[in-house]
Image (tube, rainbow, N blue to C red):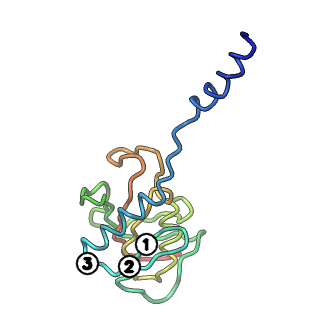
């Protein structure tokens, strides 16, 4: 009898130990689409779920994953709460060191271009809470690409 009880309880134990693995793809897509509507934006999207609005395509060099990019930016949540921004002078980053949304979005413009990226959590910080950014957050960035090297 104990043997059968163990076999009956084993699947329950296994399934109850699994992590909650909510797929935020559709949730994020709905949040982004609502933000686009509320903000009266005309946005394009990529296959990965990144949405973007190109304000100025720029001229010259297009960054690649190995580029160093000099940018001015403002990062905020869909409720408008700013979590990071450049203050005054632009800053330089290696594109490969940035979130996937930036890695995918910045090559859509050239030097001196401007873009708004609407980044689903899977292309941002995923389920990590970063200072004032809650886990699984959609991120919005207004970016001016000042230089590419």
Image coordinates of residue 62 in percent, x first then y, are 53, 81
Which label's residue is closer to the chain start, 3 or 1? 3
Query: What kind of element bears circle 2?
Result: loop
- Image quadrant containing the N terminus: top right
Placement of 19 over or under 132, stated as above or below: above
Mark 1 surroundings within 10 Å by alpha-carbon count, few (fewer than 14), some (14 through 19), many (20 or more): many
Which label's residue is closer to the chain start, 2 or 1? 2
Q: How many marks?
A: 3
For image coordinates 48% across by 65% down, the residue present is: 101
Q: Nearer the viewer, residue 3 or 110?
A: 3
Asked whether disc 2 touches disc 1, contact meaning CB atoms under 8 Å apart, the reply is yes
Q: Is residue 60 left or right of residue 10?
A: left
Please name the residue that numbered disc 1 is placed on.
51
Q: Nearer the viewer, residue 5 or 144?
A: 5
> Which image quarter: residue 3?
top right
For image coordinates 57% across by 63% down, the residue present is: 96
Q: Residue furthest front?
A: 1
Please name the residue that numbered disc 3 is placed on.
40
Q: Is residue 128 left or right of residue 133?
A: right
Image coordinates of residue 71 in percent, x first then y, are 40, 70
Q: Nearer the viewer, residue 46 or 19?
A: 19
Query: What kind of element bears circle 3?
Result: loop
Image coordinates of residue 2 in percent, x first then y, are 72, 10
Label 3 and label 1: CA atoms lie apart by: 14 Å
Label of residue 43 in the image? 2
Q: Residue furthest bottom?
A: 59
Q: Residue furthest right?
A: 3
Label 3 and label 2: CA atoms lie apart by: 9 Å
Mark 3 surroundings within 10 Å by alpha-carbon count, few (fewer than 14), some (14 through 19), many (20 or more): few
Placement of 80 over or under 63, stated as above or below: above
């Amino acid at each position: 009898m104990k043997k059968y009880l163990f076999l009956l309880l084993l699947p329950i134990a296994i399934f109850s130990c699994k992590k909650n693995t909510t797929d935020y793809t559709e949730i994020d897509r709905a949040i982004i689409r609502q933000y686009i509507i509320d903000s009266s934006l005309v946005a394009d999207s990529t296959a990965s779920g990144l949405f973007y609005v190109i304000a100025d395509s720029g001229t010259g060099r297009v960054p690649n994953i190995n580029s160093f990019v000099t940018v001015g930016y403002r990062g905020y949540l869909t409720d408008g709460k700013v979590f990071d921004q450049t203050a005054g002078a632009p800053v330089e980053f290696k594109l490969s060191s940035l979130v996937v949304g930036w890695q995918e979005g910045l090559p859509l413009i050239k030097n001196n271009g401007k873009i708004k990226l609407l980044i689903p959590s899977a292309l941002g910080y995923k389920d990590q809470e970063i200072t004032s950014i809650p886990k699984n957050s959609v991120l919005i960035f207004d970016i001016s690409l000042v230089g590419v090297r």
